[in-house]
Image (spheres, rainbow, N blue to C red):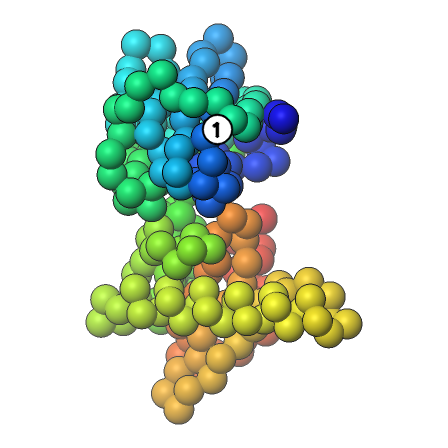
Amino acid sequence: MATTGSLREIPLAALIETGCRSRASARLRLRQGEWEGEIYFSDGEIVHAVCGDLRGEPALWRLLGWTEGQFVLEDEVRSPERTLYRPWQDLLLDGMRRAARSPDAASATTPFPSEWIARLRSIEGVLGVVICGPDGVVMAAEVPEGKGEAEGAVAVYLAATAEALADLLPFGAFEHAVVSESQRRLLILLRSPFIIGLVLSPQASPALVLSEALARLA
């Protein structure tokens, strides 16, 4: 069985997570213009990547820089070789950081997490920003005292809880939430495939920050 689509509609990071979480053998074929690439999955990990003459991590870094093109995700296709050995979360995080620093990143139509950090951090009343995947892996962060992992874990846990409640109650799909503490608040919002946590000052208006954040992420 094969699933086809556009990288504009489903980012490559989300496709990689889907391939790894299925814990099955699969091949993800990618095409951008005249360029083609392939990513292979097995037992919940990325085991091989190829793009032109590149193999392994260099090929994966090249493919993660693609924000346009077509994909075909095929089930039950085994990899012809193994060139990748690190956990998929580490590979994805490293690859997206590299792609965000590449010369082509500035012209990409879809911003990378590091670009979102800069946009959101400059909003009045925002003390910090953390962006992570649905599994809790922090993709980028700039938070007080450098507690990105902790803020990311909180954001993912609360977002998952809110989504579960939305499935049970007639409130519609989860879009955002605010968690209040004595000295600060955490605004959580979804921007597929990422979960974003904004650390707010006590004086900040969550409604105004949310409106500005949505405008800057549009």
Figure label count: 1
Compare residues 145 and 64 and report the one nearer the observer. Answer: 64
Instruction: Identify the residue shown where x is 45% and y is 12%.
Output: 35
- Is residue 184 depicted above or below 95 in this figure? below
Residue 203 visible in the picture: no
Q: Position of residue 118 (x, y in %)?
A: 37, 53
User: What kind of residue is marked 1?
Assistant: Ala
Q: Position of residue 84 (x, y in %)?
A: 27, 30
Compare residues 41 and 51 and report the one nearer the observer. Answer: 41
Task: Identify the image quadrant of residue 212.
Answer: bottom right
Q: Badge 1, how many Cα within 10 Å: few under 14, some, many 20+?
A: many
Task: Identify the image quadrant of residue 149.
Answer: bottom left
Compare residues 134 and 80 and report the one nearer the observer. Answer: 80
The residue at which mark 1 appears reads as: 26
Instruction: Identify the residue shown where x is 68% and y is 63%.
Output: 173
> Which quadrant does the N terminus fall into?
top right
Task: Return the residue found at the far bottom.
Answer: 182
Q: Position of residue 94 (x, y in %)?
A: 28, 40
Question: What is the secondary structure assignment of the residue under circle 1?
Answer: strand
- Is residue 188 depicted above or below 97 in this figure? below
Instruction: Identify the residue shown where x is 77% and y is 72%.
Output: 170
Residue 83 visible in the picture: yes
Relative to residue 137, is residue 27 drawn left or right? Answer: right
Q: Position of residue 63 (x, y in %)?
A: 39, 25
Relative to residue 179, is residue 49 drawn left or right? Answer: left
- Is residue 38 depicted above or below 130 in this figure? above
